[in-house]
Image (cartoon, rainbow, N blue to C red):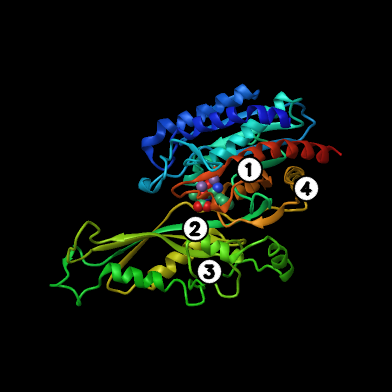
Amino acid sequence: MQAFLETNKDRFLEELFELLRIPSVSTDKKYKTDVIKAANFLKDKLIEAGAENAELCETPGNPIVYADKIVDKDLPTVLVYGHYDVQPADPLDLWKSPPFEPEIRDGKIYARGACDDKGQTYMHVKAFEAMMQNGGVPCNVKFMLEGEEEIGSEHLEWFVKNNKEKIAADIILISDTGIIANDVPAITVGLRGLSYVEVEVTGPNRDLHSGLYGGAVPNPINVLTKMIASLVDENGKITIPGFYDKVAVLSEEERAELAKAPFSLEQFKKDIGLKDIEGEAGFTTPERVSIRPTLDVNGIWGGYMEEGAKTVIASKANAKISMRLVPDQDPDEITELFTKHFVSIAPNSVSVNVTPHHGGIPAVVPTDSVAYQAASKAMETTFGKVPVPIRGGGSIPIVAMFKQELGLDSILMGFGLDSDAIHSPNEHYGVFNFMKGIETIPYFYKYFAEMSTS
Ligand code: BES
Ligand code: MN
Ligand code: MN
């Protein structure tokens, strides 16, 4: 197997590059044909690798790539989930090489989607090929690769609800998260949820001359920024009444367990160019980005934004606000609490509109399962170290949905690094990580099959 991976490494990379050249940005309709192209590419590669029943399953949105290899109905079945859609590449001028012209610099593949999630999804296709070429798969495998993860997986939920038989499995395997460092493997055992809203504050019925009216009327931008500023207090606590009511409190033992994952605050600051950090009082930086909920403005606009100065009081001001949620917060409930509160703190002089976007339920993965043990042993085999369980700060909303709809847990065995700049300019993925994933995945199948049947 090892020799097979060595011999085929360059071809694996060349194929991944081909996939990375397709700008399958899901949020922008103008890339629709590229989205389909990426789906077809994966379908074809799965067929070449030896998968059966490969098809593009049409949905009202982007297609889901399905393929399987059923070797024995008595063996367990692993359902591999991944996503072939990517985030937009902008701001383009900050990329050192064009986002859809992948290149390797310093052992890293630079391209949009290199890590999130084309690189990680493609590891599964190549790991499958490697197994097929070296004695076959030790259990049944199904692939379900979607093209709408970055826009809320709306139609995946629809697909899952309508295809329970087709995708029936014993465990879901996902590589869309990360490890701590290349010599510190980790398995993600929790993900945050999400509530995302857009707010609009309207003042006067038209833009006004800031000299003729300024001082006597509400300025929607001033009002909005004041309202936003009040949402988080000086201790980093979110001020929305009821916001923390359902936040699961971790025991000291649980916190101590999570604190075992190595972390350097100095390195953390250095990586992102900060002299100092801030966050919720009473919690460490790793805790702030994993087991605690947050509220962040993701975008804010209004008024005059072109070159030069224009003296104007705008009629409207807008912002996009995200709240990362933790167990057992409910996204719909939080969106409602936010809306009520936001409307209540608005002065009478303006009107406020809150529009909810997609949300996501937080997820936790049990560590006492056969699947977790198999994943842990697989990583231990290839890294030479037992992986640390970590809670991820990001969201993969379908993990909670899989549990709800299929009763299945997911194994979040990702190989990325926090420094891979996913969603940012110069996203990259280590060639080491790509190959390590391809090497590790077959061990998961092997151990999962062995441990499930023994
Ligand atoms: N793969 C990421 C999520 C992730 C990355 C989780 C690293 C843990 C570690 C995923 O593609 C993503 O970006 N999810 C979105 C949520 C979605 C609803 C847009 C996110 O977390 O912002
Ligand atoms: Mn992803
Ligand atoms: Mn993403």
**On the image, numbered disc 1 is attached to which residue?**
174
Q: For the C terminus, which image quadrant?
A: top right
In percent of the image, x 64 and y 54: which residue is there?
180
Answer above or below: position of 358 versus 158: below
Of the numbered discs 1 and 3, the one sitting upstream in the chain is 1
Q: Amino acid at mark 1?
A: Ile
Q: CA distance from mark 3 to mark 4?
A: 35 Å
Q: CA distance from mark 2 to mark 3?
A: 12 Å
Answer above or below: position of 49 versus 86: above
**On the image, numbered disc 2 is attached to which residue?**
195
Q: CA distance from mark 2 to mark 4?
A: 32 Å
Q: CA distance from mark 1 to mark 3?
A: 30 Å
**On the image, numbered disc 3 is attached to which residue?**
243
In percent of the image, x 73 and y 42: which residue is there?
382
For disc 2, the neighbor class at 10 Å (few under 14, some 14 to 19, many from 20) is many
Disc 4 and disc 1 in contact, CB within 8 angstroms: no
> Residue 128, how many percent across, how many down?
67, 30
Q: Amino acid at mark 3?
A: Phe
Q: For the N terminus, which image quadrant?
A: top right
Answer above or below: position of 128 versus 291: above
Q: Nearer the viewer, residue 224 or 22?
A: 22
Of the numbered discs 2 and 1, the one sitting upstream in the chain is 1
From the image, state whether disc 1 or disc 3 is nearer to you.
Answer: 1
SS for dot 2:
strand
Q: Residue furthest right?
A: 454
- For residue 298, side relative to residue 55 (left or right): left
Q: Residue furthest front?
A: 106
SS for dot 1:
strand
Residue 373: image tag: 4
Q: Amino acid at mark 4?
A: Gln
Of the numbered discs 4 and 1, the one sitting upstream in the chain is 1
Q: Amino acid at mark 2?
A: Ser
